[in-house]
Amino acid sequence: MSEPIPRPRPTIAWTKLPDGAVLFSPESEVYYAMNHVGALIWELLPKRTLDMNTLCLAVRERFPDEAPEQICDDVAELLKELEENGLLTGSESNSAP
């Protein structure tokens, strides 16, 4: 599970709310609402390459009572949905400065 993860598109606008966040893509005019866990994952997404294992561990630090496998499954599912909605760019093997 150490594969690189996609990054947020730089054009995505987002607003943190008390119970989550809302993302907006100006290119596709897609709005995407997420709960507080999704908002945490969005905030943890890198501006440079980070691997899936590190992301799951960071989420687990906030939710230690949840099973590690469930956390990783949920993170992977959210990333897939975000990518399908055009809110993420593909992962890159080399970081940009």
Image (cartoon, rainbow, N blue to C red):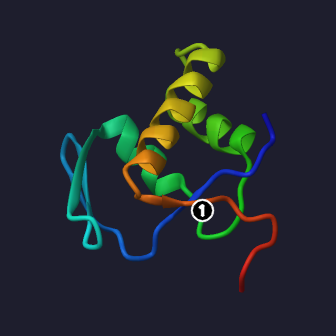
Residue at (20, 40) in percent of width and height: 19
Farthest bottom residue in view? 97
The N terminus is located in which quarter?
A: top right
Q: Secondary structure under badge 1?
A: loop
* Residue 37 horizontal/vertical position (percent): 38, 36
Q: How many marks?
A: 1
Q: Nearer the viewer, residue 1 or 54?
A: 1
Q: Quadrant of residue 90?
A: bottom right
* Residue 85 horizontal/vertical position (percent): 37, 50
Instruction: Please give left or right for residue 88 compared with residue 57 in the image.
Output: left
Q: Residues within 10 Å of mark 1 (few under 14, many from 20)?
A: some
Instruction: Please give left or right for residue 85 compared with residue 34 in the image.
Output: right
Three-letter residue code for mark 1: Pro
Residue at (67, 36) in percent of width and height: 57
Residue at (60, 55) in percent of width and height: 6
- With respect to residue 1, does 8 lie above or below? below
The C terminus is located in which quarter?
A: bottom right
* Residue 31 horizontal/vertical position (percent): 20, 54
Q: Nearer the viewer, residue 61 or 97?
A: 97
Residue at (53, 34) in percent of width and height: 75
Instruction: Please give left or right for residue 4 compared with residue 81 in the image.
Output: right
Q: Which residue is mark 1?
A: 46
